[in-house]
Image: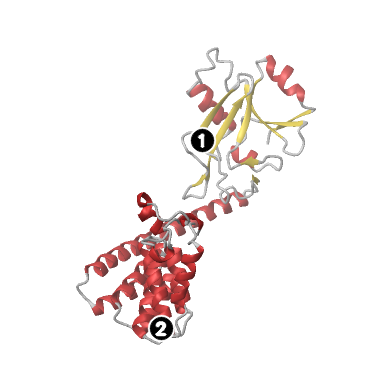
Amino acid sequence: MDQYKDGFDPARFLQQMDEIPAFLTELPTGEGEDLPPLVAALQSLKYEEDDPDACAANYKDDGNFNFKLKKFRYAVENYDKALQLKVTKPDLLTALYWNRAAANFQLKNYRRTIKDCCEVLKIDPLHIKACYKGAQALFILEKYPEANLWIDNGLKVDDANTLFLELKAKVLAAEKKKIRDDRIRDREAKKLQSLRDAIKQRNIKLTPSNPWAGDSVAKTPSGASVSLREDGSLVWPVRLLFPEVDQQEFLDQVEEDSTFGDILRLVLDENPPPWDEKRAYNTKTARCFFCDPESKSIIYEASNALALRRILSDQNYLVENALPVFIVLSYSSDFCKAKYLSQFEKVVKITE
């Protein structure tokens, strides 16, 4: 011990005493701080008891010490080592299982908590704390029927226990909410399946094929998406692109039997967009187009007399993210033929 070769320094007497393992007043408390070798050696002596109960009691004391310091993982390790011994005293065994259950609860190891509480109750069926802690863990895991059983068992021991009564009220409320949420979820799942079936029956191709699975369903700025009415008809949101003026317009609810003339009338005639001051776009000159998903050299023009359903069911149309998109061009503009349509090898007009 070279640090003491010059004798004790009166000014550092207490500090020097703390450096001597036998006179330590407290152990390091840092999470990753190791004990000095001599201290660790001294501490290990208490685990060399011939009596397993005495050795287990020492581990329990260390576990309790770590629990007070909120070092719950270390506490669990202490209780684990104690329970690996052949403990014969029921009270000690009960304390070890209970303390480990409490430490695991703090670590959110709720299943381990329940398991240890079960061990406690095997030894002491009237252990009210273990019954309550197990019920708490089951409640957190949303095992409501099981939690109720544990609570009822606890109330048999103490029917006026406010902790059990309050927890029972929480469990019952959560159980009702879960039943209600499950019903809503089942109802929504059935509605979604009916919607998907209706789309499939119309031979409408979606990409991805199930946009609802990956939350890929596109919506309009106001939040509208495709829906199925009670009469079995589909209502679609529609996005219209105007490349000549770099603008777009959305329609939230378009019935599938609406014609493209109806769609353009809503956007261009009944509620003219502010960017079209000269009214260059109208139902007489404007048409809706879409590109071939397989061949970029072909563009299709939909007749204003055709219904939306007809085009969505067309073998060459692909609905991306459940939101139909169309390009709107005006034949009264040079941009339509000279600039936009000229980039395609072929323009296919769909009239029926």
Q: Nearer the viewer, residue 89 or 41?
A: 41
Where 229 sits versus 222, above or below?
below
Where 330 sits versus 106, above or below?
above
Residue 109 shows in the view: no
Answer left or right for 349 relative to 89.
right
Answer left or right for 182 relative to 313.
left
User: Which part of the image, by quadrant, shows the C terminus?
Assistant: top right
| Element assignment for label 1 | loop
Q: Position of residue 269 (x, y in %)?
A: 51, 22
Q: Quadrant of residue 218?
A: top right
Q: Position of residue 99 (x, y in %)?
A: 37, 72
Residue at the farthest front position: 6
Q: Quadrant of residue 299?
A: top right
* Amino acid beneath label 2: Asp
Residue at the farthest right position: 345
Answer left or right for 331 relative to 134.
right
Residue at the farthest left position: 160
Q: Nearer the viewer, residue 179 or 231?
A: 179
Reading the image, the residue beneath label 1 is: 220
| Element assignment for label 2 | helix
Q: Tell me, yes or no, whether the two marked residues, 1 and 2, touch with CB atoms within 8 Å.
A: no
Q: Position of residue 224 (x, y in %)?
A: 48, 39
Answer left or right for 216 relative to 302.
left
Q: Position of residue 71 (x, y in %)?
A: 42, 61
Reading the image, the residue beneath label 2 is: 53
Return the mark for residue 201: none
Residue at the location (35% across, 63% down)?
A: 68
* Amino acid beneath label 1: Thr
